Image: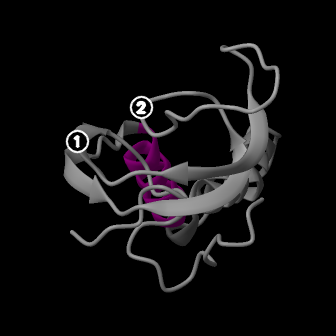
Amino acid sequence: MPSSRLPCSGRVRPSPSCWSASYFSTAPFIGAAVALGLPGETASPAFWLASGLMGWGVWLHLTEHHEHEHSHEPMAHDHRHVHDEHHQHAHDFEWEDDKPHEHWHHHVALVHKHPHFPDIHHRHPH
């Protein structure tokens, strides 16, 4: 994970690693729901309320669509990437066009619109 990742707390929009943590946090609720199928097990109204809120949160994560025109400032950094619209640069080494690779590279200023999530290239105000 890049060292430039911000922690989950205090962010307006969490990073993908935070989303993964939120999905895995549903495991105890899933386990409890399975246990409710056993004879003699019951659940309180608080359990059903918490389960509903957890399910709603996961649904929001899965159905999120974030797209708008945004700008990228020029920058230089090193991370694993493929050549997409954010990574258009020449190489001074042999490399297959469709293979992910990692090296120091420069980004030019860019303004465009596409669906995106917060990542190392998409940290902009809304």
**Residue 124 coordinates in the image, percent (x, y):** 32, 67
In this picture, which residue range is highlighted in magenta? 48-62
Query: Badge 1 local density, few (<14 within 10 Å), some, or many (20+)?
Result: few
Q: Which residue is mark 1?
A: 112
Specify the quadrant of the image occupied by residue 17. bottom right
Specify whether residue 42 is in view.
no
Instruction: Indicate the amino acid at tag 2.
Output: Glu
Instruction: Indicate the amino acid at tag 1.
Output: His
Specify the quadrant of the image occupied by residue 115. top left
- When the figure is inspected, residue 42 is found, relative to residue 35, above or below; the finding is below
Q: Secondary structure at mark 2?
A: loop
Disc on the earlier residue, 2 or 1: 2
Q: Secondary structure at mark 1?
A: strand
Query: Badge 2 local density, few (<14 within 10 Å), some, or many (20+)?
Result: few
**Residue 27 coordinates in the image, percent (x, y):** 75, 51
Q: Contact (CB < 8 A) between labels 2 and 1? A: yes
Q: Which residue is mark 2?
A: 85
Front one among 101 and 59? 101
Front one among 105 and 43? 105
The residue at the point 82 percent across, 41 percent down is 39
Front one among 114 and 71? 71
60 within the magenta span: yes
For this orientation, the residue located farthest to the bottom is 10
19 within the magenta span: no
**Residue 51 coordinates in the image, percent (x, y):** 54, 57
The residue at the point 56 percent across, 82 percent down is 9
From the viewer's perspective, is 12 left or right of 14? left
Quadrant location, the C terminus = bottom left
The residue at the point 26 percent across, 72 percent down is 125
For this orientation, the residue located farthest to the front is 92
Front one among 56 and 35? 56
The residue at the point 52 percent across, 37 percent down is 87
